[in-house]
Amino acid sequence: MISSLSGTVRQKDLNTLVVDVGGVGYKVLVSTDTALEATPSSPIFLWTHMVVRENAIELFGFLDRESLETFELLITISGIGPRTALNILNVASTAMLRQAVASEDTSYLTRVSGIGKKNAEKIVLELKDKLKGAKGDISLSSAHAKAEGDALEALVSLGYSERDARDALKKVPKDVVSASERVKAALKLLSTSRD
Protein backbone atom coordinates (compact mmCIF):
# COMPACT_ATOMS: atom_id res chain seq x y z
CA MET A 1 0.00 0.00 0.00
CA ILE A 2 1.16 3.53 -0.76
CA SER A 3 0.26 5.61 2.31
CA SER A 4 1.99 8.87 1.38
CA LEU A 5 3.85 10.60 -1.44
CA SER A 6 6.55 13.22 -1.19
CA GLY A 7 7.74 14.67 -4.46
CA THR A 8 7.38 17.43 -7.03
CA VAL A 9 4.18 18.49 -8.77
CA ARG A 10 4.72 17.89 -12.50
CA GLN A 11 1.20 18.55 -13.73
CA LYS A 12 -2.15 19.54 -12.30
CA ASP A 13 -5.77 19.56 -13.45
CA LEU A 14 -8.97 20.39 -11.62
CA ASN A 15 -9.01 17.13 -9.64
CA THR A 16 -5.72 15.38 -10.41
CA LEU A 17 -2.04 15.91 -9.80
CA VAL A 18 0.94 14.12 -11.27
CA VAL A 19 3.56 13.88 -8.50
CA ASP A 20 7.11 12.98 -9.52
CA VAL A 21 8.73 10.78 -6.88
CA GLY A 22 12.26 9.78 -7.82
CA GLY A 23 11.55 9.92 -11.55
CA VAL A 24 8.21 8.08 -11.37
CA GLY A 25 5.04 10.13 -11.96
CA TYR A 26 2.10 9.13 -9.77
CA LYS A 27 -1.36 10.28 -10.87
CA VAL A 28 -3.27 11.26 -7.72
CA LEU A 29 -6.96 12.15 -7.50
CA VAL A 30 -7.39 15.16 -5.20
CA SER A 31 -9.99 17.71 -4.14
CA THR A 32 -10.20 20.96 -6.07
CA ASP A 33 -8.82 22.80 -3.02
CA THR A 34 -5.73 20.58 -3.00
CA ALA A 35 -5.25 21.06 -6.75
CA LEU A 36 -5.52 24.83 -6.33
CA GLU A 37 -2.91 24.82 -3.55
CA ALA A 38 -0.47 22.73 -5.58
CA THR A 39 2.02 24.63 -7.72
CA PRO A 40 3.75 22.98 -10.70
CA SER A 41 7.47 22.31 -10.10
CA SER A 42 6.98 22.78 -6.33
CA PRO A 43 7.46 20.12 -3.66
CA ILE A 44 4.36 18.51 -2.17
CA PHE A 45 3.55 15.96 0.52
CA LEU A 46 0.27 14.04 0.31
CA TRP A 47 -1.31 11.46 2.57
CA THR A 48 -2.75 8.85 0.21
CA HIS A 49 -5.33 6.10 0.04
CA MET A 50 -4.81 3.45 -2.63
CA VAL A 51 -7.81 1.71 -4.21
CA VAL A 52 -7.10 -1.51 -6.10
CA ARG A 53 -9.76 -2.77 -8.49
CA GLU A 54 -9.78 -5.49 -11.10
CA ASN A 55 -9.11 -3.02 -13.90
CA ALA A 56 -7.51 -0.04 -12.15
CA ILE A 57 -5.32 1.18 -9.31
CA GLU A 58 -6.18 4.67 -8.07
CA LEU A 59 -4.46 6.94 -5.57
CA PHE A 60 -6.44 9.55 -3.66
CA GLY A 61 -4.34 12.31 -2.07
CA PHE A 62 -4.89 14.69 0.87
CA LEU A 63 -2.86 17.54 2.29
CA ASP A 64 -3.69 16.66 5.90
CA ARG A 65 -4.28 13.50 7.89
CA GLU A 66 -7.75 14.57 9.06
CA SER A 67 -9.07 14.75 5.48
CA LEU A 68 -7.64 11.30 4.73
CA GLU A 69 -9.27 9.85 7.86
CA THR A 70 -12.63 11.44 7.02
CA PHE A 71 -12.38 10.08 3.45
CA GLU A 72 -11.61 6.60 4.79
CA LEU A 73 -14.62 6.77 7.13
CA LEU A 74 -16.89 7.87 4.27
CA ILE A 75 -15.91 4.93 2.07
CA THR A 76 -16.87 2.48 4.84
CA ILE A 77 -20.51 3.46 4.20
CA SER A 78 -22.22 1.18 1.70
CA GLY A 79 -23.11 3.05 -1.47
CA ILE A 80 -20.33 5.61 -1.04
CA GLY A 81 -17.32 4.82 -3.18
CA PRO A 82 -13.98 6.63 -3.22
CA ARG A 83 -14.94 9.10 -5.96
CA THR A 84 -18.22 9.96 -4.23
CA ALA A 85 -16.36 10.42 -0.93
CA LEU A 86 -13.87 12.72 -2.67
CA ASN A 87 -16.77 14.66 -4.22
CA ILE A 88 -18.33 15.09 -0.77
CA LEU A 89 -15.04 16.44 0.60
CA ASN A 90 -14.70 18.57 -2.51
CA VAL A 91 -17.77 20.61 -1.62
CA ALA A 92 -18.09 20.15 2.14
CA SER A 93 -14.97 20.77 4.21
CA THR A 94 -13.97 18.12 6.74
CA ALA A 95 -14.89 20.51 9.57
CA MET A 96 -18.34 21.26 8.13
CA LEU A 97 -18.99 17.56 7.48
CA ARG A 98 -18.06 16.74 11.08
CA GLN A 99 -20.32 19.53 12.34
CA ALA A 100 -23.26 18.39 10.20
CA VAL A 101 -22.87 14.80 11.41
CA ALA A 102 -22.46 15.85 15.06
CA SER A 103 -25.60 17.99 14.90
CA GLU A 104 -27.45 15.36 12.78
CA ASP A 105 -28.12 17.99 10.11
CA THR A 106 -29.01 15.95 7.03
CA SER A 107 -30.35 19.05 5.28
CA TYR A 108 -26.84 20.55 5.28
CA LEU A 109 -25.43 17.39 3.71
CA THR A 110 -28.08 17.25 0.99
CA ARG A 111 -27.90 20.96 0.18
CA VAL A 112 -24.17 21.52 0.37
CA SER A 113 -22.60 18.28 -0.75
CA GLY A 114 -25.21 17.46 -3.39
CA ILE A 115 -25.98 13.94 -2.17
CA GLY A 116 -29.43 12.42 -1.81
CA LYS A 117 -31.50 12.39 1.37
CA LYS A 118 -31.07 8.63 1.94
CA ASN A 119 -27.27 8.82 1.65
CA ALA A 120 -27.21 11.90 3.91
CA GLU A 121 -29.20 10.02 6.57
CA LYS A 122 -26.91 7.00 6.17
CA ILE A 123 -23.80 9.19 6.60
CA VAL A 124 -25.20 10.77 9.78
CA LEU A 125 -26.31 7.43 11.20
CA GLU A 126 -23.09 5.55 10.48
CA LEU A 127 -20.62 8.33 11.29
CA LYS A 128 -22.32 9.85 14.33
CA ASP A 129 -20.09 8.01 16.81
CA LYS A 130 -16.98 7.99 14.62
CA LEU A 131 -16.89 11.69 13.74
CA LYS A 132 -16.76 13.47 17.05
CA GLY A 133 -17.05 17.24 16.88
CA ALA A 134 -15.92 19.43 19.75
CA LYS A 135 -18.62 18.82 22.36
CA GLY A 136 -19.02 22.43 23.38
CA ASP A 137 -19.31 23.67 19.82
CA ILE A 138 -22.12 21.47 18.57
CA SER A 139 -24.89 24.11 18.89
CA LEU A 140 -22.62 26.70 17.29
CA SER A 141 -21.64 24.16 14.62
CA SER A 142 -25.26 23.37 13.91
CA ALA A 143 -26.05 27.05 13.48
CA HIS A 144 -23.05 27.48 11.17
CA ALA A 145 -24.05 24.44 9.09
CA LYS A 146 -27.60 25.80 8.79
CA ALA A 147 -26.31 29.25 7.79
CA GLU A 148 -24.09 27.67 5.12
CA GLY A 149 -27.01 25.67 3.71
CA ASP A 150 -29.31 28.72 3.76
CA ALA A 151 -26.67 30.85 2.03
CA LEU A 152 -26.24 28.22 -0.70
CA GLU A 153 -29.99 28.04 -1.21
CA ALA A 154 -30.23 31.85 -1.45
CA LEU A 155 -27.46 32.06 -4.07
CA VAL A 156 -29.05 29.31 -6.17
CA SER A 157 -32.42 31.10 -5.98
CA LEU A 158 -30.65 34.22 -7.29
CA GLY A 159 -29.73 32.29 -10.43
CA TYR A 160 -26.19 31.10 -9.68
CA SER A 161 -25.29 27.47 -10.36
CA GLU A 162 -24.90 25.27 -7.30
CA ARG A 163 -21.23 24.72 -8.16
CA ASP A 164 -20.46 28.46 -8.48
CA ALA A 165 -22.36 29.18 -5.27
CA ARG A 166 -20.47 26.46 -3.37
CA ASP A 167 -17.11 27.66 -4.72
CA ALA A 168 -17.85 31.24 -3.67
CA LEU A 169 -19.02 30.21 -0.19
CA LYS A 170 -15.84 28.18 0.33
CA LYS A 171 -13.83 31.40 -0.21
CA VAL A 172 -15.86 33.42 2.33
CA PRO A 173 -13.89 33.78 5.59
CA LYS A 174 -15.05 31.44 8.39
CA ASP A 175 -15.57 34.36 10.77
CA VAL A 176 -18.48 35.55 8.60
CA VAL A 177 -21.15 33.41 10.26
CA SER A 178 -24.67 34.66 9.49
CA ALA A 179 -26.34 33.43 6.32
CA SER A 180 -27.09 36.95 5.06
CA GLU A 181 -23.49 38.11 5.58
CA ARG A 182 -22.17 34.97 3.86
CA VAL A 183 -24.50 35.63 0.90
CA LYS A 184 -23.29 39.26 0.65
CA ALA A 185 -19.64 38.21 0.75
CA ALA A 186 -20.23 35.43 -1.81
CA LEU A 187 -22.07 37.86 -4.12
CA LYS A 188 -19.05 40.18 -4.07
CA LEU A 189 -16.79 37.28 -5.02
CA LEU A 190 -19.17 36.11 -7.75
CA SER A 191 -19.52 39.59 -9.26
CA THR A 192 -15.73 40.08 -9.44
CA SER A 193 -15.27 36.68 -11.08
CA ARG A 194 -17.76 37.63 -13.83
CA ASP A 195 -15.95 40.91 -14.62
Image: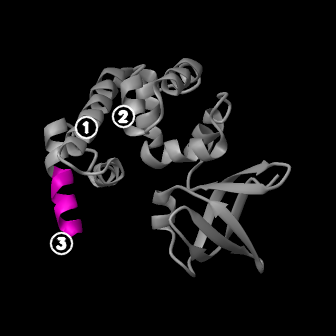
| Helix, strand or loop at mark 3 | loop
Q: Which residue occupies the foreground of this view, 131 or 107?
A: 107
| Mark 2 residue type | Arg
Question: Dot 2: what SS?
Answer: helix
Q: Residues within 10 Å of mark 3 (few under 14, many from 20)?
A: few
Identify the amino acid type marked 1: Glu
Occupied quadrant, residue 4: bottom right
Q: Earlier in the sequence, mark 1 or mark 3?
A: 1
Structural crowding at the residue carrying mark 1, measured as other residues with C-alpha within 10 Å and reported as few (<14), some (14–19) or many (≥20): some
Tell me if label 1 and label 3 are in contact, CB under 8 Å: no
Q: Is the C-beta separation of discs 2 and 1 under 8 Å?
A: yes
Please provide percent x and percent y for residue 133.
46, 27
Identify whether 120 is placed above or below 151: above
Rate crowding at label 2 as few (under 14), some (14 to 19) or many (20 or more) other CA atoms within 10 Å.
many
Residue at 83% from the left image edge and 54% from the top image edge = 55
* Residue, disc 1: 153
Q: Which of the numbered marks, if any, corresponds to residue 195?
A: 3
**Which amino acid type is shown beneath numbered disc 3?**
Asp
Q: Which residue is mark 2?
A: 111
Residue 28 magenta = no
In the rendered structure, which segment of residues is drawn in magenta? 185-195
Residue 98 sits above or below residue 42 on the image: above
| Residue placed most toward the observer, 118 or 190 | 118
Q: Residue, x 30% and y 34% (percent of image)?
A: 149
Q: Check the image and report above or below for 174 versus 140.
A: below
Measured as percent of width and height from the top left, residue 66 is found at: 56, 43
Q: Which mark is residue 175?
A: none
